[in-house]
Image (cartoon, rainbow, N blue to C red):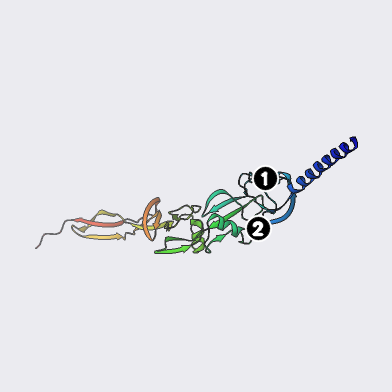
Amino acid sequence: MRRSLRVSLFALVLMGLVGASAAFYLAQKSVTLTIDGQSREISTYAGTAGEVLAEEGLTPAAHDVVLPTAASAVHDGDTIVVNRARPLTLTVDGVRSEVHTTALSVDGALTELGFRSDNLVLSASRSERVPLDGMDLAISTSKDVTLIADGQQRTLTTTAATAGDLLAEQGIALSATDRVSLYPTQPLLDAMVLQVTRVQVADVVEVHPVAFATVETPDPNAFTGQKTVTQQGVPGEQTVTWRVTVTDGVETGREQLSSAVTTAPVDQLVAVGTKAKPAPA
């Protein structure tokens, strides 16, 4: 009787162990883990996607995308996708911002951020991979602007990022005195007007005549009313220096810098008769 009881107890224990082993085996599942497009198969007893990631030493960052969510239950044959976010320092038409993307390439990042035009000027190749620690990306979009310069007004379609870039693109050089309606570093936006005003400043020297004086002296040997030039007068010269400002071909300012008589005039001498005329016979 005792032997039969021992056998029965042993059988119960054995069945329990086999059942536990079977349950443990059934709890194991095969899961595909895809990180940034790279997939691998793993075996796990974890119950949720978050637990699977924890087992693999992965802690998703704030901008990472995890599908399904960390709290979702996982089953045999499931796939867990982790797309890690990459920081981008994005400069669009001169305006800088900080964004994140889970795209692996520049082209993918452009699509993800809504830049779908093919007419973009980029600081990096579309095929370039976006590193996990991020990168700088400058984008110049197409825009219509009005350029007024050198007597012409034109409406241009350009991808230039700034006013200075547009001037360089159009081959317009500026002198130190020229004026521009926009700062060279100002970002260009659609429908903007950029005007270049040509300003020339030059010193101009002018020479003006200085009139001579006429000096009359009495001549007792000449009859009254008679005048004789004894020394011809010679005009002098006055040199005046001006600083002249010309704006788009029109003089808009004049400042006198100096004025001096550089050649003195020579007086004209005239002898005037004082001798009384004889009475008529």
Q: Which mark is residue 191?
A: none
Q: Is residue 79 left or right of residue 228?
A: right
Question: Which of the pair 69/112 is nearer the observer?
Answer: 69
Q: Earlier in the sequence, mark 2 or mark 1?
A: 1
Task: Estimate the x, y position of residue 118 in percent, counting from the top left.
Answer: 53, 64
Residue at the outermost top position: 2
**Classed neighbour count for the residue bearing mark 2: other residues with Cα under 10 Å, few (<14), some (14–19), many (≥20):** some
Task: Identify residue type, mark 1.
Answer: Thr
Quarter of the image for the N terminus: give it.
top right
Residue 215 lies left or right of residue 206; in this view the side is: left
Q: Nearer the viewer, residue 153 or 49?
A: 49
Nearest the eye: 16 or 136: 16
Mark 2: amino acid: Arg
Q: Which residue is mark 2?
A: 129
Q: Nearer the viewer, mark 2 or mark 1?
A: 1
From this viewpoint, is residue 262 visible?
A: no
Question: Extreme right residue here?
Answer: 3
Packing grade of label 1 (10 A; few <14, some 14-19, many >=20) is some
Position in image of residue 41 (x %, y %)? 73, 54
Secondary structure of the residue carrying tag 2 is loop
Q: Which residue is mark 1?
A: 48
Q: Residue at x 63, y 62 (%)?
A: 127
Q: Quadrant of residue 238?
A: bottom left
Position of 175 with respect to 138 (left or right) is: left
Q: Which residue lies at the image location 45% right of the left edge and 53% below the top edge?
A: 182
